[in-house]
Image (cartoon, coloured by chain):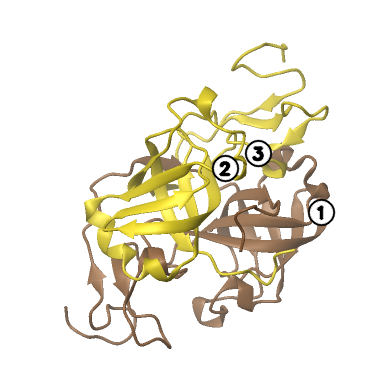
Chain colours: A yellow, B brown
Amino acid sequence: MAMTEGPGPREGEIAIDLPASFDAGIYFVGRIHTPFASRADCPRSGSDSDAICTVEVFERYAAALRGIEAASHLHVLYWMHLSPRTVLVQRPRHRPELRGAFALRSPVRPNPIALSLCPLLAVDGRILTVRGLGCVDGTALLDIKPHHRDRAAP
Amino acid sequence: MAMTEGPGPREGEIAIDLPASFDAGIYFVGRIHTPFASRADCPRSGSDSDAICTVEVFERYAAALRGIEAASHLHVLYWMHLSPRTVLVQRPRHRPELRGAFALRSPVRPNPIALSLCPLLAVDGRILTVRGLGCVDGTALLDIKPHHRDRAAP
């Protein structure tokens, strides 16, 4: 595979052909509003961001928020629509070695589902204010889960 | 909505019509092997389980595991194919009040994506041994992410 600059694969990276059809479908249940207009503006990961962001749940799904104000932290799952899905082995920036997509939290992965743990700051109808999302403004929301401290956590 | 027993809605629960088409598609990238043959055998949540489970990544995606042995803990995302997607407000068992799907970690949600944080015990080719998954044997794998302690964590 040729070494390229920019969005193409870098030296040693491995890309695959994906299956001809999907195995399951997802619905976008809302939209995330952030201060980041493009990928170039985004922090490397959500945990590098102190940005105040809002999570807008679409009207159709608003009833699913009942009781959410009791949560101190949320797991927010969203869809990284700008990420290529074919690159399995990547050369992360600022690291010498090649790594697999499942050994990285890079947006580049077969299913570009992102996961961020965010403090919940406020609830106003179907708009949640949270801290620490690092995605592009307008990113599609997939799910919200209240965070309970996991016994498995280190 | 009528009060029913069993798999139907309970009193006060709210179900909706879902959109006619999906917004995005996902690939199943592997399969999870657990001691739980049916939903009735499963613990209430993965964090109630000390079960030793294996995560099998399909051959097509095996290269994405490169470097994963460096992780102590993994976020495992999987697809709860047995869960209804239409019920937005639920009456959790063992709780008096109605709660929205986004205020619960119940499998019943518009996008039945589950998230478990698991200690990684062993890596043997494309088979990972982990502790603490609570899903039915044969459940489809969506993604694996190495867990780094999040600044947002309480």
Marks 1 & 2 on one chain: no
Q: Counting other residues with Cα less than 10 Å from the Cα at mark 1, is it few (<14), some (14-19), or many (20 or more)?
A: some
Q: Read off the residue under disc 1.
A: B123
Mark identifier at residue B60: 3
* Residue B6 x, y percent position in the rendering: 33, 84
Q: Is mark 2 on a helix, strand or loop?
A: helix
- Which image quarter is the C terminus of chain A in? bottom right
Q: Counting other residues with Cα less than 10 Å from the Cα at mark 3, is it few (<14), some (14-19), or many (20 or more)?
A: some
Disc on the earlier residue, 3 or 1 = 3
Q: Is mark 3 on a helix, strand or loop?
A: helix
- Which image quarter is the N terminus of chain A in? top right
Image height of A84 relative to A58, above or below:
above
Q: Which of marks 2 and 3 is in front?
A: 2
Tell me the kind of residue under disc 1: Val
Image height of A42 relative to A61, above or below:
above
* Residue A138 x, y percent position in the rendering: 37, 35
